[in-house]
Each structure stands twice: as C-alpha cells, then as structure tokens.
Image: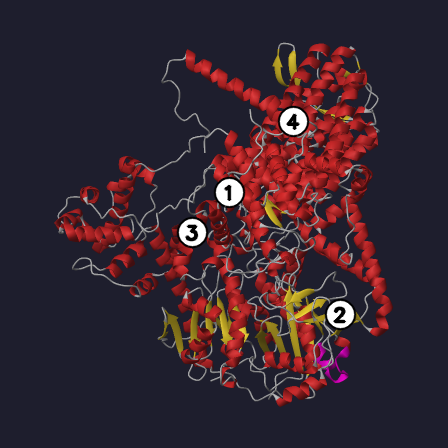
Amino acid sequence: MAVPTVVISRFATLPGSRQLLHRAIHHAAHLLPAQGPIGVFIHHNTLHAFQHLPFEDAVTAAAAVYGARPFMTEQAYREQFSEGRITSADISAVVSREANIGITDFLDRRVLRTEILSCGPRDFAPSAIQWHLDETDFLGAFRADLSPVAITKLTAGRKSAADSLQALFSACMDVRGPEKKPAIADSQLPNIAPHVIADEHIHPLLIRLCAAFVDQGMAYWSMPGREGGFLKAVQVLLSRRGALLPGHFVKLAEEFRLQLEAGLEAEEVVLEMLYRLGITGDSFDAPILAELLELPGWAGIMYRLEQEPELAPHVRLKCSLMDYLAVRLTLKAIAAATLPVRPEVRRDAKLGTTILARAAFRFDCLQILGISGAELNAMSAHQRRYLVAEIDALNLAERTRLLHLAYEFNHEIGILKPLANYRRINGIATSGTRPSAQVLFCIDEREESTRRHLEELAPDMETLGAAGFFGVAMDYAGIDDAHSVPLCPVVVKPQHEIRERAAHADSHLSSARSSRRKLWARAVRYLSVSSRTLIRGWAGTLVGLLALPLLLVRVLFPRQYGLLRDLLHRETVPQPRTTLDFSRTRTDASRSEAGLLQGFTVEEKIDRVAGLLGPAGLRGGFARLVVILGHGSTSLNNPHESAHDCGACGGRRGGPNARLFAALANHPAVRVGLCDRGISIPDDTWFVGGYHDTSNDLVELYDLQEVPATHREELNCLSRQLDRARALDAQERARRFEAASPEGSPERALRHVQDRAEQLSEPRPEYGHATNAVCVVGRRGLTKGLFMDRRAFLVSYDATQDANDEGLARLLGAVVPVCAGINLEYYFSFVDNERYGCGTKLPHNITGLVGVMNGPESDLRTGLPLQMVEIHEPVRILFVVESTPERVAPVFKANPQLSEFLENRWIRLATLDPETGVVHVRRGSKFELLDVAPSQLPTAGNSFGWFGSQLRHLPLAHITGPGWQPRA
Amino acid sequence: MNLESFLSPESLLVAAVLAPGVVFLLLAFSWILGYLPAERLVARVANTTFSFCLLALAGMMFGMWQTGATSVSAGSGNWLEVHEFRIPLALFVDRLSLPLVVLTVVLVGTVAVFSRRYLHRDPGFHRFFILLHLFAFGALLVFSSASFDLLVGGWELICVTSVLLIAFFQHRAAPARNSVRVFATYRACDVGLIVGAFLLHHATGSTRYSEVFEGTWPNQTVALESGLATAIGCLLLLAAMGKSAQLPFSGWMPRAMEGPTPSSAIFYGAISVHAGAYLLLRAQPIFEASPIASGLVVFIGIATALHATLVARVCTDAKTALAYSSVSQLGIILAEIGLGLSWLAVIHIAGHAVVRTLQFLKAPSALHEYHGMHAAAGGHVQATGLHYELLLPPGLRTWLYRFSLDRGHFDTLIERLFAQPLERFAVRMKAVEQHLLPVGTHAKGSGPRE
C-alpha cells in the first residue's frame, strides 16, 4: 500500500475555490450568534444579520435558517385570546390593514381571516386525523364554539349535525385546491447537513478542544501551543502517537501529522476536507453554513474573538473561524470515512396523511365560516378553488403572524389611548415653584417604579431619565479594579481615561487596602485551586468538616451571610476616601499607552454636561439638590449577571458615570461655560452622584463629604426618601416573584430581594428587562403619576426647547439602538427559548469563563435563559416620542441605523404632539392619526393600591397620590 | 407500646431511616393520583422530613450516650425467606455508619433547602423532590443496613435515583444518552456486590455483619480462608469501583454532570460516590484477611487518584473539573482503606463530602467569584501548572495534556474491551435468532426508539 505523501488534492489548489470558500465563510459568519464572552453581556438584536429585511420577513427567513419559531406558538396566542389579551376587534383591525380580495359574493379575505382567527382552527396532529375520524366526535358534532348563525347555516336542509358534517368533510376531501407549495411549510425542518451521524461522534472531542482553546483561566493547565492558533495547536496535540483512539478516529493522528508536515494553511485543509466529504460545486455557502450551525455557539465565539480579540477577558487568543472549520472538517472527514452510513430515518408524512390533514383543516375552517358541504358543492369550480386556496393560505406561519400583529396592536392601543387621555386630562405640569430636589435616573424601565415611588413620597420632587452613561463616555478604573473598562454604549469608543484615586490624605490606606485585598485574593485562589489538586486537596478535604458551618449559613441564611461578609470586609480592609482624576489642561494633549486623553478639559466638560442637560430640557429650574443615579446589578447563581447591568454603560455598572457627571456639573468653570450655552445653574445647586443596584435595591450616594453644609438638611431628607422609595420599589418587584410573600410590607420585600441577591440557589435574582415594551421620549409631565408597570423606558426630552430637533436626533441615536437591542433580544429569547435563548438555567455549566454549556458537553449556549424571560411579553418596543410626525420623520430618515429599525418595523413608533396632545401612530410607512375617545383611567391612591399582590401584567393607571391632586 | 420504647434508640433509628421512604411513597402516590401539591408544601414537607430525621438521630445518639452503647441494632423479621436463605430486615449503626448516616441527613436536608429555590417553577420540581427522598432513603438504608443483602436494596435505590436525575432534562438527547451509560456502568459493577454477597452467604451462612464478623468496627475479624476472602474482596471492590468512579470506570462521572446542580452536589460530591468507600470499610475484615484484595484496593485507589488529578487539571468547565477532583480524592480514600487507615478514611469521607457539596452548589456562581478574586488580585492571578511545566520536557507535556484531555482514553478502552465485543456478540445472536425463527415474527420497530 502506498504511503500517502501528498495530502493535498488538486481541488484544494484550484484558484477559484479559495474565493468561493471565503465568500461562504463571510456569508455564514454573519449568521452566527454575535454574543461575546459572557462576563460582559451586551444586549443586541438576536437577528441582527437579518435586520436589512422587514421584521416579518426576517423572522420567517431566520426561522428557516435556524429551525426556530418566528413567533410564539399558536397555542400561546390562543391562550392570550382566551384571556382577552387579543380580541376579535384587534384581529379585525390587523386584517383590515392588509390587502383585501373578494372570494365569494358574501365573503372576502378580511372576513374569512377575522372569523377563522377569532375562533382558531383546532390543532390536529396529521397522523392522528384518521383516528379522530374513526374514534372521536370529529364528524359527529360541531365545534363547541360555533356561533348559532353558523350552525343554522351548516344544518340547513340536513337532518342532523353528523349528517351535515359528513357531507362537509367529504366535500373537503373532494375539492382540489391549487397544489402550490406554500411559502413556508407548517413544520419547517432545519437544514440537514450531510453526514449527520459523523456529527454526534465528533462533537465530544471538538467541544473539548474548543473549550480548552478559548479557556480564560478555569483549567489548571492551559492548552499547549495555543498561541499558534487553533488549527496548529490541535494538529500538534492530536498528531502525537501513543493515544488510544476510538475506531472512527484511528486515522486522525496520521492525518494531522501529514497536515503538519505539509505545512498546510487552514484554507487548504478546509478545501481538501470539503473535497473528501464530496462537497464540491460552484458554491460552498450552504454546506459551510450547515457545518457552522451544527455548533453555532462555539463557532460564534471563535468568530467573535477573531473579530475583536480584546473581548477575551483574560487571555487574548489568535482565534479564527477558518481554523475552527479546518479542525471540524478534518475530524468529520476522518470519522465519516470509517463510520457506517446509517440510512437516515426520515419521518416524512405520507401523502394520504397530508391530504387528510389538509382536508381536516379546511373542514374546520369551513365550519367556522358556516359554509356547508352543499354550499361548497354548489359553488363554481373556480370559486371553490379560490375559497380553498384562501383557507390554505392561512397556514400556521400566517396565522401566528396575524395573531402576533393583533397581540401587538392590542398592546399598542392599551398604551397609547390611556397616555393620550392622561395627557388630555392632566395637561403638562409647568409648576412655577422650584422642585424640592431633582433625581436623574437611567432611562432603564426598571427605574420607572423607583421614580414613581419617589414622586409619590415627595410630589414636589422631579425625576428625569437619561441614558445611564450620562453623556460621559470614559475609560474607567476604580481603585479596586484590575483593569480599566469602557463605560459607555458599545458603539462608542471612549477617548478619555478617568481614574479613581485615593484622596491625598488617605493614600497610605489605599496601598494597605490593595495589599489586604491581594492577600485575600491569594487565599481564595489558593484554596480553590488546592482543593482540586491531589496532595493539597487531601489535606484540605481531611479538615473539610470545618466548612460545614459555611455551607449551612450560605444555604440557610444567605442574607445574614452577606451582611457578615460585608462587615468583615469593612473591618479588615481599609476604606480610603477617593476622588476621580478627571481634569486635564487645555494644552495637554498627551495620550496614554492606550491612546487615551487623561481627563477632560474645561471645554470638554462643558460639552458633556450641556449635551446631557440640554436635550433633557433642563436649561433652568434646577433644584438645590440634583442627584444622578447610575445603576447595575449584583447576583449569585447567575452567569448572566452582567446582562442585568446598565446597557448604556456597555453591560457594566454605571455608578462612576453618575459620580463623574456630578463632579463635572459642580465644577465652577463648567457652570460659567454652561451659562454661555443657555443653561443656567444657580449657585446654590449641588449635584450628587449615586448608584442603584436593581437586584438588591441598594442605593448609595457618593462624595457626601463634599456637599456644602447648607445642603445637609435637604440631603438627609432626600436620603430618607430614597431609602423609602427603594423599599417600595422592592415591594413592587416582589409582586412578580411567586416565592415572595404576596402581602409583604416594603421592609419585608426589601429583605426578600436582598436575600435573593445573596442566594447561591436563586436562578432569578431579578427579572431584569423582562416585560419591557415601551419607550416614552418626552417630558416627565406626560407620565408623572402614571403607573407603567416597570415596562417603559423613560427618556426626558422637551421638544419645546429643541427648535431644530438636534437634541432629539442625539437622544434617539443613542436610545433607539440600546432599547431596541434589549427588546429584541428578549423577544427572540422568549419566542424560541431553546433556539434563540439558552434554555433553562438549571443544567448550565460555566465553561472557560466565556459562556455556559448544558451539562458537561454541549454547544456554547447563547441568548437569554428561560428564567430571565419567562414573564416577558414578546412585543416589539413601542417608541412614543413627544413631538410631531413632521419633526420626527426627518430625524429617523437622517440616521441610517434608525431608519433601518423603523422602515423594517423592528420598532414601533408613535408621536404625541407636545402642544395638542394628539397621537399619531406609524403604520406601514406613514403616520396615522389615532382616534382617542375621551375616557377616564383607572385610579388608585398609591402604586401598591393598584398592583397589590397580583402577578400578571397590569394596565396603565393613574396614581393620584395622597397629597397630589390631578391638575385641571 | 409505651413512650419509652417509642423513644428508644432502636425505634428512633428505624424512624429516621424510614421517614424519607414514607414521604417518598406519599409524594409519589399523590403524583400518580394526579395531585400535585404546591411547591411551598413540598418544600415544607422536605424540611420537616429531614429535620425530623436529624432530631431522631440526635435522640438516638443521646440514648446511646446514656447507655454507653457504641452501636444500635433494630428490626427483626425477614424481607425474604427461601429455605435457608433469608434477607433479614434489620438496621444497624455503629461507629462506622453513624457519622455517615448523620452526614447524609444533614447534606440531603441542606440540598433540599437549596433545591426549593433552584428548581422553583421547573416542570420537574415534584419529580426532583420525589427522587431526592427516595435517594435519601436508599442512602440511609445502605449506611444503616445490618446485612449485605439489605445494603443491596439501598444500593440499587441510589443507582435508580442517580440515573433518573442524570436524565432529569428529558427533552434533550444528551442527558438520556449519558444516563444510560451511567446505568450500564452501575449495573455491570453491581454484579460484584450481588455475587460477593452471595459468596459470603455461601461461605458463612449469613450476610449479617454481626454474624459474619467478630468484634466491633474497626477491630473486626472474619473467619474466611484467604482465597475466598480474596474472591469476595475483589467482587466487592468491583462494586465499589463502579459506585465511587474508580478506574477504569471513572468515565461515567463527567457524564453524570447532566443533571441539575443540586443533584450533582448530593450524588457526586457528597453521598452517592462515597457509598463505594463505605462498602469497603464495612467489609474491612475481609480485606484484612486478604492481602491481595487490599493491595488491589490500594493500587486502584492510587491509580485513580493520579489519573483523576491529571484529568481535573485540563478540565475547562466548572462541573467536570469538580467531578474529577472528587474522583481524585475518592482514589485517595480507597487507598487509605486499603492501607487499613479506617478512621482516617471516615474523616476524609466526611470532610470531602462537605467541601464538594459547597463547591458544587457554588459552581453556577463561579464567574462572579472569579471576577471578584481577579479584581482583588489586581489583575495578576497566580498562574497554575508551572511546577510540572518546568519539570517535564515539552514533548512529554503535550503527550500528558493529550492523555488528560481524552480522560486517559479509558472510555475508548472500555468501548473496545467491553462494549464492542458485547455489541458484536449481540449482532451474532440476532443473526442466530433470525436463522432459527421463521421470518415475519420480528417486530418491525426494533431500531432505537425516539
């Protein structure tokens, strides 16, 4: 037997092949999940790759590629229908917006669709229909929910129900519809790659290799030679002799050895293996995509880290999708060559079953429509075919699409009408008096409740919302941070570096602090590593009983454990006062190694403060105290912890941004400069930065020692109000948690959420952005006193002070991508949690510090876990901008990104006229006036009075507040 | 019966062991009858059960302390009687089993509290708690049975619950596949326990510890000739190797990580994997009578420990790394037992169970903890693996890494040595069968079911 000396075939060197391959990879890479290492979770549209298509087309196209669901299940919509969350009126409204066609003299497409969707065809498994015919009352009794009119029409001229149903069914069997293949099959099968059997045999090894390669510090030994890239490392590793390999991999070592000797590049390996697998032709797009989608998570992380190596949290790697593909295909080609090819078990529905299923569906629909067999037979052949084609066109995909639109329509009306009525009744508050305080929150919908409670407690307080990086994009490192991180939206690249330093007087404490912390880290590291080694582990586990109290306390008394830990931390680690290093002289343009400017010049400071306050409509009327609250979240048992942090800070905590903004705004030179730009901050106004933890509802304020003595009293008062508001917020959040006591007091609820954040076992420390659905861009006067159920992003914007709409363009440019990204990620993770989300958290297993797998060996799971999205309502986010269509439309048009979101309907948009309060909704490609009949909103004295102990979503309501009278 | 006999150590022991079993029956029957109690109620029942067990055990220990007894045996009558063969229904705790019984109750109780939140709203919530109680009953039975026969009963309950919890996520293929693999390993090794118990009965006329062994643990002797002792010892060792994931069977351990985290903790960190070690400790006089068997225990233990520690070093995911760390300590425990260091082994078992339970329960929070540690260390985390890297030549290093990454190739070894010959044999038998039986009697759907 000849020794194979030339591994590479002629095919791999064909000049055109490489080009084809690169095109295929480029095409496929876009369809891989874009999620990076999980430590920094950035919400983004799961179907970003399809964003150039209109929403409904995109979800359908993506469903075919990923084998996923485009919308919820029909069952889920039917449940919503029976709960009144979708009504016939909604369906009718949605259907009437689409093209209409007359079918028979008395029936057109709109009527047909509305009636069928309102009743809902019964769901019969195709294989069970024969059984239904034989064994059940399928042909013996009408559907239970038929209208009397339909029954009368169906039974006309017949002795019994059974008689007429028999006739109808046989008429349905007889009729010949146009046998056209529907655009989307009812049960879309995912693409089946060649050699499916080989896949299950290569995955265990491939997953282990990928995990070893990208590992960021879990393993004691890292993969040898991984600096040279994935392919090279695998070739060296697997080409070694002296390993016992399973039958299908016996030739693997030799293959890799030959590759190594021939010095093949990844592309050459890929082409060669494609050839060996029999994949040739003039396009590799489909097979390459199918290959990569076998393990989309691992392929995705390779591509992500290839594109942005700096995303790797600890070890930068030379990742390459081509390398991955080369390894994958080599394993596969070797395995496929030896494995017996099992005939693929395809459970294609038999033709007879298909005909029966189609007839049963038509039969069911005709019952709903009240068309009897006789009537059907009496129609002309043409008309009959036409009718049947219309019924067939209402297949599962089409039904769920329409039901989804109705579902969203209902939501839209439920928001816009009360909002318009509230505006009509209350007008916009323009109180002449100075507010007792102003608190600036992130726009995050989780802050909506805190703002509302704060205003309920102190009606003369004003709250505002702005994207949580508060206009200061920076590269930040606190005294406890190992590295600096960008604190700004992901699309922005910070140009300035800001460092937290110990105050001059406390500099000695700072070094003591860091050495103590290092000592602690060393101890923790030593213990966790040594408990896993042989000898040290032996010593450690021999005295393991000492850990029993720790185990018991952590599981049985988590909150107390947290308090004890914090106490110990405070007592043993020095706490130096710190300041932010944020100033730079105008002339100093030196840049750090990373190419960053060190701090802001006065001019830059003014830009940032004005850039935030101006669009928010804060040009005057400042209170004596202005608090800026950034936010973040802390939790255990939650690899997705970062997904709960501030999206506007790139999936990180926004406390430092709030602190910096306050410092900038307190700067005397900045105030002078602001005055020139028409923003006059009184001398007695003081800004305070702070941080809100949305998981345990902690609120802390920074730099309180700098607050002037004159403001102490007010600050204490405000602190008390914030303290109360966070407890009320905890109470409102607790209503969604089944585990919380339904009638718990605010204090008890606060303890409950604190407990949650410290539980090692809690898969739902908070519900995060779940239920988000609306974004209101406008003055707080529109929504003050309105219960919005923590479902609305609130962006402060005053159109009356934004004559040329520059502020709006700026706001929307930042807000739309962030909110839509969050909203769409939740949408997709909810509608198909297994495909688009990462399934239930319970079997999740952290791997390589980059992501989670199911159990010991699976694909890297991307998207959101079931426990984060389970209470979500999958509706596209509804933007309500307080402006006019004439002003808003050009803003969207001018920005290509926004325009794509809007034109392709990935977001919904409405405007509310700042002068008249008239609402326009964007439908299709134009704005339509919404007709709002005046009506009263439900009212309640306070928020608790409205939400009580209910678990479900609640409609908008007017919270009157004890001392707060509605304005006439 | 008066109060005193109710509160006697004997009845308290019986109560503590039976309680989880009774609760299992209650929960299981209510489930079969279609009644699903609220989660809150299930959690309360679990808390009550394990608190009750703990109290009963405390009472029992108090009674023992008062009378100065070092062991309690309870129960009478037989489970099964065939001529001279009988399986006595009797419980027995002594200085060996008492720590393990208490440990089981404490750890299962803790994990039950943990699981109430962890599995909240999961469709398998009830299933999990039913199995957890059955497991607790099985484990208590193993540790407190008075004979090897009854131990087999508990042993099999552990096997069944373990496998069902690995396959907890039924809608995916991987858990089902892996649980079958674990099941096969367990069953293959259980042959050792059953045949061993049978041989012991054959040789001594009983399997009851008190009748087979002389003296009190750990100073017991057995009247067996050394050849027979070696045979029985090796068979029991086979059983222990399966349960405690020793070489060459360690490969099932990572596969068992498919289950939800709390079950991984209680089975593969805490109780189930130590049952094998307990069996060897219990049969210690037999091993003392056979230097060959105890030598084999030491050898397998050390080989496993070395193998597992190597594999654990290359594991990149939280749960598998913990699984192999467990195996390496289990290897040491076996070695300790083989060397006759019985007390050390018991202390090691208890300490190891507690540490691993905590570590498994913390596994989903690994990222949070690592970030905290990394920041505190100022971004410079002490590198690991440098000792060996400096000692070994690069070629050997790569080989060792490869060896560890493939988990010592033991899965392949088992496949080649056992699975494939068995499969070939089955195929041949099928051919014979088809040859012998007329065509047409075969059911069509003989392929793997979906």
Front tag of 2 and 4: 2
Chain letter behind tag 4: B
Front tag of 3 and 1: 1
Is B167 located above or below residue A48 in the figure?
above
Q: Residue at x 37, y 16 (%)?
A: B439
Q: Where does label 3 land, which residue?
A: A63
Expressed as whole percent of the image width and height from the top left, the position of residue A26 reads 50, 54
Q: Quadrant of the C terminus of chain B?
A: top left
Image quarter of residue B254 = top right
In the depicted view, which residue is nearer to us: B95 or B324? B324
Q: Are marks 2 and 3 on the same chain?
A: yes
In the depicted view, which residue is nearer to us: A388 or A611? A611
Q: Amino acid at mark 3?
A: Ala
Q: Where does label 1 land, which residue?
A: A12
The crowding category of the residue bearing disc 4, from other C-alpha atoms within 10 Å (few below 14, some 14 to 19, many at least 20), is many
Chain letter behind tag 2: A
Q: CA distance from mark 1 to mark 2?
A: 56 Å
Q: Amino acid at mark 2?
A: Glu
Q: Amino acid at mark 1?
A: Ala
Q: Residue at x 21, y 56 (%)?
A: A149
Q: Label for residue A500?
A: 2
Q: How many marks?
A: 4
Is disc 1 placed on a helix, strand or loop? helix
CB-based contact (under 8 Å), mark 2 and mark 4: no
Which mark is first along the chain, 1 or 3? 1
Chain letter behind tag 1: A
Which mark is first along the chain, 2 or 1? 1
Q: Is residue A271 magenta?
A: no
